[in-house]
């Protein structure tokens, strides 16, 4: 009986800790909102995208060839950020976190990625501007689907 109590207490602690990490992990506590309808933000984001992102993701946001197939080094090529990719499948806060901390830090474990973390390179406002530019290029239907994803993943109180 004592062993069962210890196991149950441990499981509850892990669940509470996991929920706490989800609510307070870096990047997740901020109420990140992209601004694809703000021409000034989008223009700023486009300049940064061309300087920082286009060399891998392409100037037309088309990504690298065969982006779903691992390279010989085990890493994935840069995905497209246009409507054909999966960028719009992720909520704003997650896109921000992936960009700021880098996929390897967000995914954790031994995950490797060629994409760097942009913390210390781009400001939070610059990251939002780049992501806003990307979203501004999606068709209206894709933007609305992305907005729905944001609404479904919105945390209580935000």
Image (tube, helix red, strand yellow):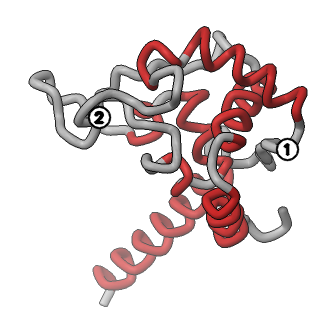
Quarter of the picture holding the C terminus:
bottom right
- Within 10 Å of disc 2 (Cα), the crowding (few <14, some 14-19, many 20+) is few
**13 sits to left or right of 157:** left
Q: Which residue is mark 2?
A: 111
Disc 2, disc 1: CB below 8 Å? no
Q: Which residue is mark 1?
A: 37
For residue 34, which quarter of the picture?
Answer: top right
Quarter of the picture holding the N terminus:
bottom left
- The total number of labels drawn is 2
Residue ID at (85%, 44%): 37
Dot 1 falls on a residue whose secondary structure is: loop
Dot 2 falls on a residue whose secondary structure is: loop
- Which dot, 2 or 1, sits closer to the camera? 1
Find residue 149 and name its label. none
Residue ID at (74%, 33%): 128
**130 sits to left or right of 62:** right
| Above-or-below relation of 119 to 34 | above
- Within 10 Å of disc 1 (Cα), the crowding (few <14, some 14-19, many 20+) is few
**102 sits to left or right of 71:** right
Determine the residue located farthest toward the bottom in the rendered image.
1
């Amino acid at each position: 009986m004592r062993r069962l109590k210890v196991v149950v207490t441990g499981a509850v602690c892990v669940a509470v800790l996991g929920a706490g990490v989800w609510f307070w992990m870096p990047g997740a506590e901020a109420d990140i909102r992209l601004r694809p309808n703000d021409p000034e933000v989008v223009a700023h984001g486009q300049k940064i995208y061309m300087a920082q992102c286009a060399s891998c993701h392409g100037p037309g946001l088309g990504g690298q060839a065969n982006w779903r197939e691992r390279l010989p080094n085990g890493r994935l090529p840069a995905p497209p950020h246009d409507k054909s990719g999966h960028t719009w499948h992720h909520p704003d806060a997650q896109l921000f976190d992936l960009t700021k901390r880098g996929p390897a830090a967000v995914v954790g474990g031994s995950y490797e990625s060629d994409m760097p973390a942009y913390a210390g390179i781009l400001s939070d406002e610059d990251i939002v501007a780049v992501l806003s530019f990307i979203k501004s290029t999606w068709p209206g239907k894709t933007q609305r689907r992305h907005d729905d994803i944001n609404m479904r993943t919105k945390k209580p109180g935000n």
